Image (cartoon, rainbow, N blue to C red):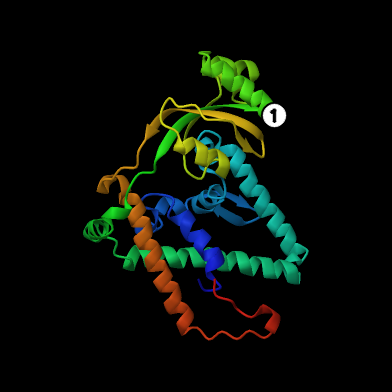
Amino acid sequence: MPWFRISLTLMVVCLLAAPYGMAQQTAPAQDTDNEVLAIVNGAPLTKMHYEQLLQQYRPEARSAAQQDKGRFMRELVLQEILAQEGQRLHIEEDPELQARLKIQKNSAIARAVVQKYIAEKSNVTDERMRDHYEKNKATFTSDEQISASHILLKTEAEAQAALKEIKQGKDFAEVAKAKSTGPSAPRGGALGTFGRGRMVPEFEEAAFALKVGDVSEPVKTQFGYHIITVTERTESAPQSFDEVQDNIRRTLISEYVESLLDDLQNKAKIEIKNPEYAIQDQ
């Protein structure tokens, strides 16, 4: 992965978060976007300025802004006042601030460029997605998952004693509530449903080797000794096109972006003046 992909890859992931986010072109500015909401010392603040401010917040905060426009408007006005004060103080002449502004500007432009190219040229059609699905059908499978409970104890002797009670007929959940030192004890040791890669390796290996209803021998991990039982298992199964359509879209768009970045980098003239900063492909 070329050097400038480190941050751009993160940007692409964000743009791909919405199912159709990167496949749609940014809508052209509407007349209402140019509506002047306030004038601060002669400088107009428009609806577009307000909307761009909101984009800095998480979706839940943006939703709240619909009922509390005045609070967000105050921030927009205060930012403008401070920016004007900064101009009076010639803050923008500070080299460190100039460098920060350049990076912020480049980041915003890079996002817009990638969005524009994807919207206009990525050509991720339903036909292409279905073709990708058929060619890679064997890879589209749901993960194997299990529902499990455990009893966590500090020593092997304590674990063997608890296991003996279970083998003698005592209910697993009751033993967990009475003896387990783990946070799941009040729930009878229930850990919920999980797939591979979620638990420490020793625990995972033992848990996925169990059949539904089986109880393990004590399993040692960094947390102590576990007695594990599996209450439900869902095997891996083929996924339909509808289930994986959004993932395929993201894959095809990512492949397009990789190609785009390769092309742009190959066309660019790049000179590294300090050998300590020699570019390394990722």
User: Is residue 245 placed above or below 221 in the rendered structure?
Assistant: below
Q: Crowding at label 1, few (<14), some or many (≥20) Cα neighbours within 10 Å?
A: few
Image position of 166 with respect to 231: above or below: above
For the point 46% across and 84% down, which residue is it?
A: 267
Say which of 214 and 111 sits in front: 214
Q: Position of residue 167 (x, y in %)?
A: 52, 18
Q: Quadrant of residue 120?
A: bottom left
| Residue 86: quadrant of the picture | bottom right
Asked whether the viewer can see residue 236, the reply is yes
Quarter of the image with the C terminus in it? bottom right
Q: Amino acid at mark 1?
A: Thr
Between residues 246 and 68, which one lies in front from this camera angle? Answer: 246
The answer to whether any part of residue 200 appears in the image is no
Identity of the residue drawn at 60% across and 51% down:
39
Question: On the image, which quarter does residue 142 sit in?
Answer: top left
Residue nearest the observer in this picture, 255 or 31: 255
In the drawing, does residue 144 fall left or right of residue 132?
right
Instruction: Say what secondary structure mark 1 lies in.
Output: loop
- In front: 63, or 239? 239
Q: Residue furthest right?
A: 89
Q: Is residue 215 above or below residue 38?
A: above
- Give the residue number, with chain letter if any, for mark 1: 155
**Image spot of residue 199 (x, y percent):** 55, 40
Q: Position of residue 252 (x, y in %)?
A: 34, 62
Q: Is residue 186 left or right of residue 252?
A: right
